[in-house]
Structures are given as structure tokens and as C-alpha cells.
Amino acid sequence: MAEEVRSFTIEKTKLNPAAFRTVIIPEIPKNDAGKTLYKDLEKYY
């Protein structure tokens, strides 16, 4: 699945593939109000 996401992103954004990497995570961490917890996402990069 990661390769499909990567290919889709490259095709749509026309970015250089070396400019980013694709990481699959189980779910986006959110607080009780439903807002994304960006601090918790830092452990993935």
C-alpha cells in the first residue's frame, strides 16, 4: 500500500521522489475534540 500512496503522490504533486518518504501509521492521533496531535506524529519522522 505504501508504494501505491507514494506513486499517487508523485503523480499528483510532481515532486521529486527523493524529496519525501512514505510512512504508514495505524491511525492519525487525535485529542478528545478531534484535532490532530502533531506532537505525537513526530515519532514517525
Image (cartoon, rainbow, N blue to C red):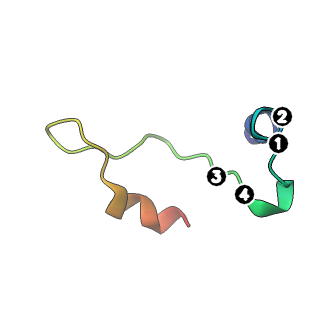
Q: Give the residue pinned by disc 1.
A: 14
Q: Do the residues labelled 1 and 2 touch (CB within 8 Å)?
A: yes
Identify which residue is drawn at 73% across, 59% down.
Answer: 20
How many residues crowd mark 3 within 10 Å: few (<14), some (14–19), many (20+)? few
Q: Is mark 1 on a helix, strand or loop?
A: loop
Amino acid type shown at disc 1? Lys
Query: Which corner quadrant of the image does residue 5 belong to?
Result: top right
Distance from the alpha carbon under mark 1 to that under mark 3 = 19 Å
- First in sequence, mark 2 or 3: give its number: 2
Badge 2 or badge 4: first in the primary sequence: 2
Q: Which disc, if any, is residue 11?
A: 2
Left or right of residue 39, residue 42 in this image: right
Q: Which of marks 1 and 3 is in front?
A: 1
Residue 23 higher or lower than 40, as above or below: above
Q: Which amino acid type corresponds to the residue marked 3 in the rendered image?
A: Val
| Eye-nearest disc, 4 or 3 | 4
Q: What element carries label 2?
A: helix
Could you tell which of marks 4 and 1 lies nearer the N-terminus?
Answer: 1
